[in-house]
């Protein structure tokens, strides 16, 4: 199978790499951050806002869309792109993580996942084949295999059982996928056991996917452990395919994971924190409700050229937050996503110019100076 | 005092009129609808959204802005325009209606209104002079005199006392206003007693304002009574000054009041109803959560060319509403404001071409046909 990934360049002193992923709706320059649009909308922003701030690809959630509005409705529109008015690439996760999060409401069997809807408690079932079929209906550019997540901490026996099942499901997912240009990524589980993860990589590569994802990280383990696993396993992942670290993370996490060879990221942090009034800036985090911003005429980040920073003061953003105005979520989300997307653009440029290690040092120095 | 109003044309068979109001931030073509931006933001939309949908002027609430974020903060920005990133005209109400709405928390004396903040219960006081000073700090293009509202129903004695006090306050407001280009409008009270309202018009015209508003309507009285009062009093209001019907109303109310000679309107209906999923269309109202919209690929209104109708289906809007997504409020608000602003544009054109009475008949015929 031809890889959708083209490697542009590699850093000479670390594992960082600059590449692109080709999809049905266009090419994505990597490393890339994907804003999360769980329910067929990135909360608080329009597709035009996303384009203006430079988003290349967004993520949708199979679990949520399967339950509401239903994949058949989305299919009737020819897929998510038309339904939600977004013509750039979309990646859909498989629903594995959401089903895992439901905990007591879920029963995993060899066949698939039996779970209750978080909306009305109705009984639902999703097999690996179903997850592929749903994502085919959603028309996403990149589909993810249904996987089973491993709690942290987990015993070695739990981790083995879950990882093996994920590999068997991956094989069924691959077989179920009708080739129509949509890419299908496999998910590497294995918990915090490097040997199990290494075995999972082997099994998934044997099956053959369009890309490989690290799942089950950022589930409560220390950041150091997450990066240790990422470093070890990224080194084992095929160099000529895209590498995706799922659900990660903080700006620091992104810098560290790029350093270890990761190409793709998604996380609710910039959007969720925006709605809670936590803003990312070039010199660290800012909590907009703090009284010290009350009279502050400056933008959130004087180095930022996003729509929010070009036109609004901290004092106004604080007022909107205190008054619980919708515009607060809109403006904060635009800023935070612009920060994440802009950070990745600067990372890409640094890798192109083979100065990413220096970029990484400067990134931390700037924060320490504050 | 020179009037800021220029009359362009008058309908030959009704009181409708086409004109303009000149303000510090530009000229407003009338009849006009002013979207309500209570807390220095029109809920759910950006200033760019407002401009794209054709809003000429917006409204801010003195009461709310006085309490939060405070007029001194807004003054430090040079006024609301810079604070909220809106460079077109702004009208600020005086706070009279909000203070009236607080009922038991308010005590009205000759000097002014003593009331408790709805935010923290703190004791506040606003005199007519204070209301002018606050609005001067806010830098609005059109300021309103502090008035006292009359409940519906009210006895003649209550109405007389309140109307007389409003006239005395109007005189003090006029005296307090330093001439700096900001316009000041007087508010005609009088409840449902036409003779009291006629007396109020006389007294306010004697004082002399840049425009005259009908206050205390749309407070629970039947629509017929509201229009009866509007018709009688509009005929007594100076023809060479702008006439503003405060807090009104439905699309039907606007058509009827224009027919009776009103130039300016504001109402929370398009924005509030948008957030509640009630959408205005050329053939009547539409409740987006209704199951019949579930699979509907059509836009909200096939005759509408707003951003929402150009890009999104009823099915998608219903999904967003059911999923309680922020984008639901954004898209619905854009549509409803576009409807209101577009209705006024069509009304202006009809008056220019002296076919407003026909426009009014067609407006109802279309609704009846549905």
Image: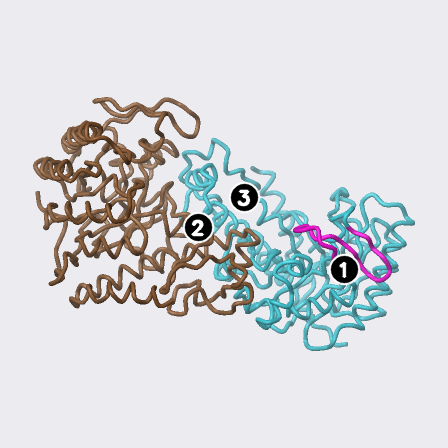
Chain colours: A cyan, B brown
- In the rendered image, residue A289, in percent from the top left (x then y), is placed at 50, 35
Q: Which residues are magenta?
A: A106-124
Front-most of residues A121 and B330: A121
Disc assigned to residue B44: 2
Subunit that carries the residue with mark 1 = A
User: Residue drawn 28% across and 51% down?
Assistant: B57
SS under mark 2: loop
Residue under pointer 1? A125
The answer to whether mark 2 and mark 1 are in CB contact below 8 A is no
User: Residue drawn 84% across and 62% down?
Assistant: A111
Front-most of residues A132 and A230: A132
Residue under pointer 3? A279
SS under mark 1: strand
Residue B139 drawn above or below residue B8: above
Residue B39 drawn above or below residue A83: above
Disc assigned to residue A178: none
- In the rendered image, residue A290, in percent from the top left (x then y), is placed at 50, 33
Subunit that carries the residue with mark 3 = A
SS under mark 3: strand
Mark 1 residue crowding within 10 angstroms, few (<14) / some (14–19) / many (20+): some
């Amino acid at each position: 199978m031809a890889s959708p990934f083209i490697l542009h360049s590699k850093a000479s002193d670390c594992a960082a790499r600059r590449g692109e992923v080709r999809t049905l709706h266009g090419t994505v320059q990597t490393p890339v951050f994907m804003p999360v649009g769980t329910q067929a909308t990135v909360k608080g922003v329009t597709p035009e806002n996303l384009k203006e701030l430079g988003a290349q690809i967004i993520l949708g959630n199979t679990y949520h869309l399967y339950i509401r509005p239903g994949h058949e409705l989305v299919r009737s529109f020819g897929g998510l792109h038309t339904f939600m008015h977004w013509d750039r690439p979309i990646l859909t996760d498989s629903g594995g993580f959401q089903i895992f999060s439901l905990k007591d409401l879920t029963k995993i069997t060899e066949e698939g996942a039996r779970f209750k809807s978080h909306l009305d408690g109705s009984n639902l079932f999703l097999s690996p084949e179903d997850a592929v079929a749903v994502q085919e209906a959603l028309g996403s550019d990149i589909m993810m295999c249904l996987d089973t997540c491993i709690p942290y901490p987990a015993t070695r026996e739990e981790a083995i059982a879950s990882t093996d099942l994920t590999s068997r499901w991956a094989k069924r997912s691959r077989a179920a996928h009708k080739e129509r240009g949509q890419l299908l990524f496999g998910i590497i589980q294995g918990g915090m056991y490097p040997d199990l993860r290494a075995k999972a990589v082997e099994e998934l590569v044997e099956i053959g996917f369009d890309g490989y994802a690290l799942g089950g990280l950022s589930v409560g383990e220390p950041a150091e452990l997450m990066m240790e696993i990422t470093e070890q396993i990224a080194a084992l992942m095929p160099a000529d395919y895209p590498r995706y670290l799922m659900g990660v993370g903080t700006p620091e996490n992104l810098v560290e994971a790029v350093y270890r060879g990761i190409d793709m990221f998604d996380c609710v942090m910039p959007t969720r924190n925006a709605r809670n009034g936590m803003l990312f800036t070039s010199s660290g985090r800012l909590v907009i409700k703090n009284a010290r911003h009350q009279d502050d005429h400056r933008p959130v980040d004087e180095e930022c050229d996003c729509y929010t920073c070009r036109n609004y003061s901290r004092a106004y953003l604080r007022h909107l937050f205190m008054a619980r105005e919708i515009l607060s979520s809109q403006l904060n989300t635009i800023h935070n996503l612009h920060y994440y997307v802009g950070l990745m653009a600067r990372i890409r440029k640094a890798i192109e110019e083979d100065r990413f290690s220096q970029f990484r040092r400067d990134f931390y120095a700037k924060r320490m100076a504050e």
